[in-house]
Image (cartoon, rainbow, N blue to C red):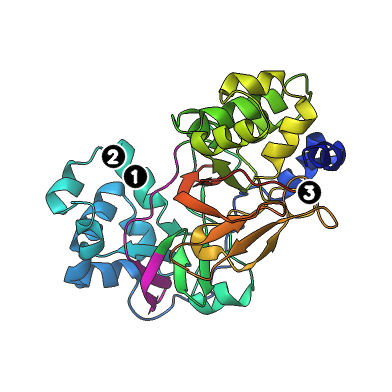
Amino acid sequence: MYSAIKTTTRRFLLPAMLLGLLAACNKIPEVEELPSTTPAGESIADIISADANYSVLKAGLTRAGLMTALGNKNNKLTLLAPDNAAFALGGINETVINALPLTQLVPLLQYHVIPQALPTATISAFGLANVQMPTLLQPSTSPLFKMSSFPAVNALGAFVNNIPIKSADRTAANGVIQTVYAPVMPPSQMMRSLIYNDTTLNFFEAAVKRASEGQTGLTLDSLLNYPYPNLTVFAPTDSAMAVLLTNMGLPASPAVFAMMPIQTVKGIVAYHILATNGTPVQRLFTVNFTSASYETLIGPAPYPGVQISMANPLAPTVKGAANATASHIKAANLHAVNGVLHKIDQVMLPQ
């Protein structure tokens, strides 16, 4: 069973993915061509100001200094707009928004502005699971790219990341307003930190570190800390990893991975990261899943993929080729700067 993991991962060369990752990075988009004349009608700022349902958002945008850009009719923008009911889900009202430090408020609301007009018909026309769209949020530590959101339109509805769009395509003279069910929170940690800081993923952390030992270039450990890829990681919990080790006749301890062959451990980890043609370019939230086979980092077909089932859209599952049963997602849509993490209750096996 486990010899197959070693065989399939001999072709798994992380340094070779570097060019692919750079091509897929969150680059700052080119500015849309300005119209020759100023468009007529209400601007996004006009609409937000006149609608009492957006009073909390208006207060925040004003404090964040974004109303000028949203009021410029020569801009082309999309505002992901939480209404008052959306903010109330998190206990936020005008008093709270006016007290929020600007160091928190500004990046939060910058992440809600896409610097081009993006109606749902345009999103749907891409024909992709989701569309990577840079926002106005530019991390001070990484001036070469802007933080992206990931709008999607599918049979379940319209979404931004994993947040539903509850009222779509309110057109303004300078773009479109997409009213979202809840604020869309920007990620703040790299995938490596998200995993390593999770006390239920100690075994998976140990496996990643073992898989990266003695390697040069882009290792699994450094990949998880690299800002440009779009990772989808299915991380088995500690209890799931303990079952795997027990079934292998080994002690159920994270320390055991340090004694296992590096290539075997690398195969285990790689089989839990989605890829396309050997490159991690898919950032899939559960709302982006379809019932299909997905390639992993061990390689494209004929190497085995993992099978995602959306038979129950509220409880999707993912199954390894050699597993008798599917893994259930115990914690979904944990968003990182460079991907999304789903914690699962079973280790997936390719063969």
- Residue behind mark 3: 278
Q: Please identify the quarter of the rendering in which residue 30 is found.
A: bottom right
Q: Distance between the residues labelled 1 and 2?
A: 5 Å
Residue at 25% from the left image edge and 52% from the top image edge: 60
- Name the side, left or right, on which 271 lies relative to 189: right
CB atoms of marks 1 and 2 within 8 Å = yes
- Name the side, left or right, on which 123 lies relative to 161: right
Is residue 248 depicted above or below 330 in this figure?
A: above
Residue at 78% from the left image edge and 48% from the top image edge: 278
Q: How many other residues sit within 10 Å of disc 3, few (<14), some (14-19) or many (≥20)?
A: many
Can you tell which of label 1 and label 3 is closer to the viewer?
3
Image spot of residue 350 (x, y percent)? 74, 48
Indicate which disc, 3 or 2, sits on the residue closer to the N terminus: 2
- Residue behind mark 2: 102
Which label number is shown at residue 106? 1
The N terminus lies in quadrant: top right
Is residue 317 depicted above or below 348 in this figure?
A: below
Magenta range is 164-188
Image spot of residue 139 (x, y percent)? 49, 38
Residue at 54% from the left image edge and 59% from the top image edge: 317
Q: Which of 105 and 44 is in front in this view?
A: 105
In the rendered image, is residue 336 in sight?
Answer: yes
